[in-house]
Image: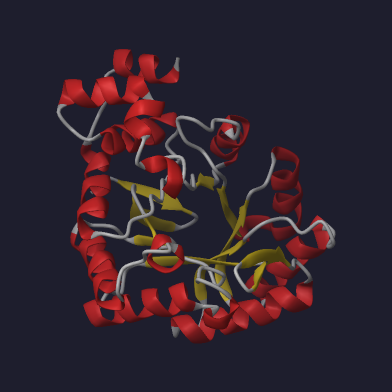
């Protein structure tokens, strides 16, 4: 599969977003979830994105991280970059925030235990916490890197100004930004360009518009459906190829809960759209 870079690591151009394996109301069985991760690895995927808060509710906090660790161990995978996140908390099924340094330290240590590693490959701040100064959260991430608990640092749901503050505080350990981006949500275009100009990987989350919208992508993104019909592939594969064409720092992380879904998504790395097709999709 085509390779791209996150910091000093080469990874597959398409990653696996593991969130649906734990948060969907009709999530797969543990056996089927592990099979989905294995299918991703079989297809050449070497980036798996997870988070401690990916669970049905607070009673099973860390469910997704434990599941990913189990799947990788049973496969015998040793060259996969696991990207996890901290900063979201759960109260029942509600999603809350805590970006305080003390919480991030504790969350990172818990993630290390669940993933069964000495240092997390890519640790990402999940979302800005309005009750904690951004600078304080970034300082906490810098400390985690300095202490060797994480190899690389990422931020998520950040704007250009926040990216620049993170760059100034975290320094070279900051390697990625994960924001929402899809055919129907292009409001992070400035952040994509900013990441490209500074050599930061950009990991678009919900590249199909989210779980609730993905099933109707043909209808909501007709230009993408038309191009898909022309080249004889799924609209999802075309969408990911369009993401990859935005900049060479873009590494989509489509969610999947079935082996067939991630296998189709992974094939997007080998789909090259023509300039004319891309112009229609960008229009």
Seen at 61% across and 53% down, the residue is 156
Q: In the figure, residue 241 lies in which quadrant? A: top left
Q: In this view, does 47 lie above or below 91?
A: above
Residue depicted at x 65% and y 64%:
95
Is residue 77 shown above or below 238? below
- Residue 207 seen in this snapshot: no
Q: Residue furthest left?
A: 232
Looking at the rendering, which quadrant does residue 280 occupy? top left
Please state the total of marks drawn on the protein image: 0
| x then y, percent, for residue 210 | 46, 46
* Residue closest to the eye, 233 or 162: 233
Residue found 30% across the figure and 38% down from its top: 236
Q: Find residue 279 and report its horizontal and vertical position in percent.
A: 38, 15
Asked whether the viewer can see residue 195, the reply is yes
* Residue 214 appears left or right of 165: left
Near-viewer residue (216 or 46): 216
* Scheme of colours in the image: secondary structure
- Would residue 60 appear left or right of 134 to someone viewing this image? left
Q: Quadrant of residue 61?
A: bottom right
**Residue at image point 27% right, 37% down:** 237
Q: Is residue 132 above or below residue 179?
A: below
| Image x and y of residue 207, in percent | 43, 42
Along the horizontal axis of the image, is 9 left or right of 229?
right
């Amino acid at each position: 599969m085509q390779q791209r870079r996150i910091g000093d690591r080469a990874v597959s151009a398409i990653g696996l977003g593991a969130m649906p394996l734990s948060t969907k109301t009709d999530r797969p069985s543990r056996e089927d979830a592990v099979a989905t991760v294995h299918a991703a690895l079989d297809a050449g995927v070497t980036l798996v994105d997870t988070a401690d808060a990916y669970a049905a509710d607070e009673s099973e906090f860390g469910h997704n991280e434990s599941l990913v660790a189990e799947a990788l161990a049973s496969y015998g995978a040793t060259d996969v970059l696991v990207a996890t996140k901290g900063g979201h908390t759960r109260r029942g099924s509600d999603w809350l925030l805590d970006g305080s340094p003390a919480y991030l330290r504790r969350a990172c240590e818990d993630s290390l235990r669940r993933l069964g590693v000495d240092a997390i490959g890519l640790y990402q701040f999940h979302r800005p916490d309005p009750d904690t100064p951004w600078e304080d959260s970034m300082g906490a991430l810098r400390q985690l890197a300095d202490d060797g608990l994480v190899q690389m640092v990422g931020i998520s749901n950040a704007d250009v100004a926040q990216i620049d503050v993170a760059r100034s505080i975290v320094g070279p350990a900051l390697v990625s930004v994960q924001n929402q981006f899809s055919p129907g949500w292009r409001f992070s275009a400035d952040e994509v360009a900013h990441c490209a100009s500074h050599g930061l990987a950009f990991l678009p989350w919900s590249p199909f518009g989210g779980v609730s919208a993905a099933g109707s992508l043909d209808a909501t993104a007709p230009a993408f459906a038309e191009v898909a019909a022309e080249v004889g592939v799924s609209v999802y594969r075309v969408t990911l190829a369009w993401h990859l064409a935005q900049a060479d720092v873009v590494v989509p992380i489509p969610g999947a809960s079935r082996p067939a879904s991630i296998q189709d998504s992974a094939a997007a790395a080998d789909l090259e759209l023509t300039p004319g097709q891309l112009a229609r999709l960008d229009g």
